[in-house]
Amino acid sequence: MFEKLEEVEKKFEKINQSLMSPDIAADIEKYTKLMKEQKQLSGVVGKFREYKAALSAESENRRMLAEESDGEFADMVKEELEKNKQDLARLEEELKVLLLPRDPNDDKNVIIEIRGGAGGEESALFAGVLYRMYSMYAQAKGYKTELVYANETGLGGYKEISFIVEGDGAYSRFKFESGVHRVQRVPETESQGRIHTSTVTVAVLAESDEVDFELNEKDLQIDTFRSSGAGGQHINKTSSAIRITHIPTGTVVECQDERSQHKNKEKAMKVLRSRLYDAEKAKADAKIAGQRKSQVGTGERSERIRTYNYPQGRVSDHRIGLTLYKLEQILNGDIDELIDALITADTAQKLKAAGEE
C-alpha cells in the first residue's frame, strides 16, 4: 500500500511542476485536465503526509523513551506514544478507503429520470413528490437543476419527468437513487381511507459528453413538434419541442422545456448520449461479476430499493436495512443521512472485497 502511496505523491508533485509550465498554462484543455487530476490526488496525498508526520512523531517518542524510561517525563512520552498508535491506525484505515478504485463518473453532472409505475394517478403524483425532494436536495447542496421533459397529468403528477442536476460531485451523491421507490399511503382520491401501495422508477445517469460517447448523426432521426402541457394545452404555438430517435437501438428522447428548438435539441442530445453511454457501461459491468457483488444494489430499474410509508412516517432503504422515522424531512430534501449511509455501506463492501483479493 505504501509503495502505491509513494507513487501517488510523486505523480502529484509532477503535476504541480507541470502546472507551473508556461506551455501548459497556455493550453486551456491540458491545464484544466491537470487541475482536475491534481484535485483528485490532493486528498490522498494530504492524508499520506499526515500519516508520515504521525510516523515520524512515533519514532521520535520511541527514541526519547529509550533514553529515559522512568519518571514523569517518561509517563508523558508513553501517553504520546499511545496516541501515536491510535492516530496511525486511524490514518491507515482512511488511506485504505482513499486508495479504493474511484468511480470515474463521481464528479459528473447527472440526468435523473422519474417514471410512474404501478398505481396509476397515485404513482404519477408520487413521481412529483420525488421530483420535489430531489430538487430541494440539489438546491441545498448548491447544485443547479434544469428540466428536460415533463409529461404532466391532470392532477399535477407526472407520468414521466427528467431533469439535469449540475454541480461538482453530483453523480457521487445521486447514483444510489436508481431503482424502484415504493410508496404506501392513503390517496387523496380514496374515499374509504384504505392504504394503497404504488411504485415509481428512478434512473440516474452520469451526464456523458462527446468524449465518452460519440453519436453518429446518420443514426439519428430528429422530429419537431409543439410543446404541450397537461390536458393538451399548448405551451407555445411553435414547433420547438424535439424528439430524437437513435435508430440502431430504438432509444427515444424528447425535450420540450425550452422555447428554443436549438436549446431543446442540445438537451435532448445530452440525455440520449448519457442513456446510450449508461447502456454500454451496464454491459461492461455485467461482464465483471465481482464488481457487481461489491456494489450496494445493482442500480437496475427493476430493483426495489426504498419504501416511503406515510401512516408510520418512516422511510426504509431495503439495500442496507436502514429505517428512519423522518418521512417529512426526507421528502423536503433532507436525504444526506440516507445517502451517507449508502456510501458508507458501499465503501465497506469494497474494502472487504479488496481484502479478499
Image: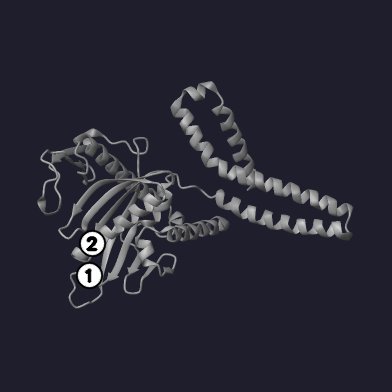
Identify the residue at horizontal 83%, vertical 50% (top origin): 63
Between discs 1 and 2, the one toward the N terminus: 2
Q: How many marks?
A: 2
Q: Tell me the SS state at disc 2.
A: helix
Q: Is residue 336 left or right of residue 270?
A: right
**Residue 173 placed where, x, y %?**
42, 52
Which residue was labeled with disc 1? 187
Q: Amino acid at mark 2?
A: Leu
Does 171 appear above or below 332?
above
Which residue was labeled with disc 2? 125
Q: Is residue 245 left or right of residue 343?
A: left
Residue 27 visible from this viewpoint: yes
Q: Are marks 1 and 2 in contact (CB under 8 Å)?
A: yes
Identify the residue at horizontal 17%, vertical 60% (top origin): 155
Task: Tell me the CA gap for discs 1 and 2.
Answer: 9 Å
Residue 286 visible from this viewpoint: no
In the depicted view, which residue is nearer to us: 163 or 249? Answer: 163
The image quadrant that residue 114 belongs to is: bottom left
Identify the residue at horizontal 74%, vertical 46% (top origin): 56
Q: Tell me the SS state at disc 1.
A: loop
The image quadrant that residue 134 belongs to is: bottom left
